[in-house]
Image: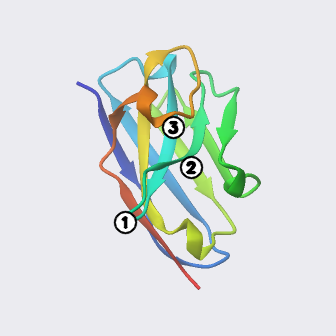
Amino acid sequence: QVLLVEAGGGLVQAGGSLKLSCAASGRTFSTFGMGWFRQTPGKEREFVAAIDWSGAVTYYLDSVKGRFTISRDNAKNTVYLQMTSLKPEDTAVYYCASDRRPWRINRDKLEYDYWGQGTQVTVSS
């Protein structure tokens, strides 16, 4: 059983920063890509960022490029999402997820099999 636990959400003013973390257990963390997704009420969960097993390759949603940075520490079994220059439209519940297959990177939420409980990020204008 894989367990993903997010932390770091909260309320921040527009232009501010937050750093989310996601601690993983129950799987060989260093062999699986990880992703961050977000969801607002009434909308589908959308891809935000992904990182491959090594941390060398990353993908981003166009609207967060240059503002968000995904990273990982395989020694700590943790993936991070550093968010800067936050905008009100970034307000959402943010989820981390683990790819269902090792040794790759993926944007498709259907290719992720384990999810965290979500952490709320609210950006006020």
Which of marks 3 and 1 precedes in the sequence?
3
User: Residue 11's x, y, as percent?
Assistant: 46, 75
Q: How has the structure been colored for display?
A: rainbow
Q: List the single residue furthest toward the bottom.
A: 125
Q: Is residue 77 above or below residue 17?
A: above
**Residue 81 numbered tag:** 2
Q: Of residues 69 and 38, which is closer to you in this image?
A: 38
Q: Nearer the viewer, mark 3 or mark 2?
A: 3
Give the total of numbered labels.
Answer: 3
| Residue position marked by numbered label 1 in the rendering | 41
- Comparing marks 1 and 2, which lies closer to the viewer? 1
Q: Nearer the viewer, residue 24 or 105?
A: 105
Image coords of residue 88 (percent x, y): 57, 75
Residue 27 quadrant: top left
Q: Is residue 125 left or right of residue 118?
A: right
Figure check: 4 above or below 119: above
The residue sitting at 64% across, 28% down in the picture is 55
| Pointer 3 residue | 35
- Tell me which amino acid carries mark 1: Pro
Label 3 to label 2: alpha-carbon separation = 9 Å
Real-space Cα separation, disc 1 to disc 3, in angstroms? 20 Å
Quarter of the figure that contains the N terminus: top left
> Circles 3 and 2: CB distance less than 8 Å?
no
Q: Which residue occupies 71% across, 58% down?
A: 67
Q: Secondary structure at mark 1?
A: loop
Residue drawn 59% across and 25% down?
105
Mark positioned earlier in the residue sequence (1 or 2): 1
Say which label, 3 or 2, has the lower sequence index. 3
